[in-house]
Amino acid sequence: MLDTISAGAAQGAAQLGWTGMVRFLHLTPRAFLPMRAAETITLVAGKGIEGDRYMIGKEEGFYSHKPEEGRQVTLFELETLVALKRDAGIELGPEEHRRNVTVEGVPLNHLVGRRFWLGETLLEATRLSVPCRHIEEITGKAIFDPLINRSGLNCKILQGGIVRVGDTVRNAA
């Protein structure tokens, strides 16, 4: 949750302070298979998430051919699920948005290029994760257009470890 905005001491620049929470964790064993809920996931620095499709080996499907170092764990905002229901009348479960970690109170759109803690792991946000149209095939819901401006966040794992539902998410500054 955005809890403070304070002036940076040395430069006088505004610095954003926040703390969030992990609400849901999911693994995707294959591109079109349902996501599996988990109470904990293990992030491995430089490799990915134990049991997830990009760490298992050769994956086939949408975007699988892209060698992207930052595509190791993807976060999504719980607030987006609330907004989809409120603004578009679409009920989307945390397993349906196809991201690994659902967080609450984390300003994902502002974290690209920044480092932050997810439980005991250290991540670096590499880019926003915009939805692709095949999400409508997977869910059977017309969610592409309402989701286009509500993206997730792709992150590189700098320091691995276990992430649990209920862990805090906090900035590294």
Image (cartoon, helix red, strand yellow):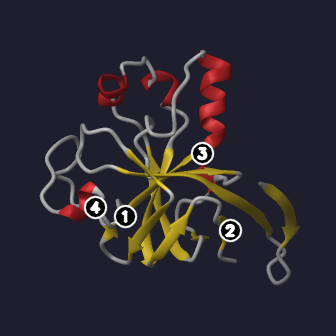
Pointer 4 or 2: first along the chain: 4
Q: CA distance from mark 1 to mark 2?
A: 19 Å
Q: Specify whether 132 is left or right of 64.
A: right
Kindly check if marks 4 and 2 are in contact, taking CB atoms under 8 A apart as contact. Answer: no
Q: Which mark is residue 77?
A: 3
Q: CA distance from mark 4 to mark 2?
A: 25 Å
Residue type at tag 4: Glu
In the depicted structure, whether residue 64 falls above or below residue 61: below
Q: CA distance from mark 3 to mark 4?
A: 22 Å
Kindly check if marks 1 and 4 are in contact, taking CB atoms under 8 A apart as contact. Answer: yes
The residue that label 2 is drawn on is 170
Disc 2 crowd rating (10 Å Cα; few below 14, some 14-19, many 20+) is: many
The residue that label 1 is drawn on is 70
Name the spot of residue 40 as percent of width and height, x first.
48, 63
Which is more foreground, mark 1 or mark 2?
2
Q: Quadrant of the N terminus?
A: bottom right
Residue 4: quarter of image: bottom right
- Front residue of 49/64: it is 49
The residue that label 4 is drawn on is 68
Which is more foreground, mark 4 or mark 2?
2
Residue type at tag 2: Arg
In the depicted structure, whether residue 115 falls above or below residue 29: below
In the depicted structure, whether residue 65 falls above or below residue 72: above
Pointer 3 or 4: first along the chain: 4
Residue type at tag 3: Glu
Q: CA distance from mark 3 to mark 1?
A: 18 Å
Pointer 3 or 1: first along the chain: 1
Badge 1 element: loop
